[in-house]
Amino acid sequence: MTASPDGLVMAELTNVVKRFDLRHTRSIKEYIVWWATGRRGQLSDEFNALDNVSFTVTQGESIALLGFNGSGKSTTLKLVSGVMLPDSGSVRVRGRIAGLIEVGAGMHPDLTGRENVYLNGAILGLSEQQVNERFDSIVAFSGIEKFIDTEVKFYSSGMYMRLAFAVAVHTDPDLFLVDEVLAVGDEPFQRKCIARMKQLRAAGQTLMVVSHDLELIKDICERGIVLEHGRVVLDAPIAEAVDFLRSTMSD
């Protein structure tokens, strides 16, 4: 991966295809008949969640992945994060990646919030000493000081998100990924998260965000990539991308 004229390449997707099986629900009787008669019919259909997707993300860009449900936004983030691998094509990334792909991801339910801070910090590449140095700031940002020594299985989804986001933004990631999880937080904490994401952007770090809140997206991101049925249909400045998506809503 090399530097482009516009800056250092942080993520590059080239002709990416990701397939999933769409399994059909069948009764026990149907399964028995299917096996007894030796039928070769399909019990599942294959579909492309991403179909020949290509784009490049350069250092310091703030990019929104836009589209309706099922368009491939979250799948794209999971491929960039390394949670999934493509079936064909390539996904290349540079630097430390952190973020929130799913609420509670990386949290162990039987560990306390304190223990999960150290666990998540280690997963995201921090040493124990680095977590020690940032621990008070992480807990203060999360706002759940009273519950930091409580097992996280007793946390609400909002508390999960608060702690996970606080850890992620304190790892100083080169590439920060956020997938709709801010929707579970209360408004004051959302404002705090948005302010921190803007700080990351101002510091030259790279953001990739998925959200259905188009006004929020316009406030955070500068570029929008619109996906439809797993294909890129528009890659443009964020205002143009949002207007394009809104123009298709009636369809």
Image: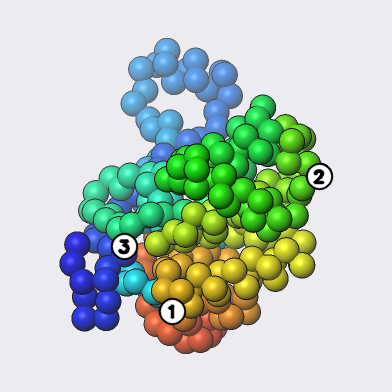
Give the x, y percent position of residue 117. Answer: 60, 42
Hey, what amino acid is under mark 1?
A: Arg
Mark 2 or 3, closer to the camera:
2
Q: Residue at x 77, y 67 (%)?
A: 188
Give the x, y percent position of residue 137. Answer: 64, 56
Element type where label 2 sits in the image: helix
- Left or right: 233, with 197 as reference point: left
* First reached walking from the N terminus: tag 1 or tag 2: 2
- Left or right: 137, with 149 as reference point: left
The quadrant in which the C terminus is found is: bottom right
Element type where label 1 sits in the image: strand
Tally of numbered tags: 3
Residue of label 1: 223
Give the x, y percent position of residue 4. Answer: 21, 75
Hey, what amino acid is under mark 3?
A: Ala
Q: CA distance from mark 2 to mark 3?
A: 39 Å
